Image (cartoon, rainbow, N blue to C red):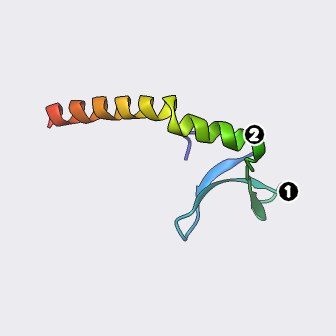
Amino acid sequence: MGRRHWDHAFLADMPNGHQGVFRRRGKSRLPIQEVQLVVTGRMAGVMEDLSEGPALRQFETLFQRELRYLSRAA
């Protein structure tokens, strides 16, 4: 993959199409375990507020800008 780097972990695509971050349990290639982040409580509320407020407006602005650029380049 090479585009992203996590200490002692790697990004992989599974045969069923699932993409995730994995890390080895020992020094050998297998077994591996998926690295998971659980978002609960206050953090979930903050993320929801951001997704409905300024972050969504910023995304819409950038998306429209990129769409205009691509339509001019075509």
Q: Quadrant of residue 25?
A: bottom right
**63 or 72, nearer to the observer:** 63
Residue 26 disc label: 1
Residue 64 in the figure: left or right of residue 23: left
Percent x, y of residue 74: 14, 38
Residue projecting furthest to the right: 26
The structure residue drawn at horizontal position 74% and vertical position 52%, both measured from the top left corner, is 35
Report the amino acid beneath label 1: Gly
Residue drawn at point x = 76 percent, y = 60 percent: 33
Dot 2 amino acid type: Arg
Residue 53 position, x and y percent, is 51, 33
Image location of residue 59, percent across then percent down: 42, 33
Q: What residue is drawn where x is 52% and y is 65%?
A: 17
Q: Is residue 16 above or below residue 28?
A: below
> Mark 2 or 1, which is nearer the eye?
2
Badge 2: few (under 14), some or many (20 or more) residues near its Cα, within 10 Å?
few
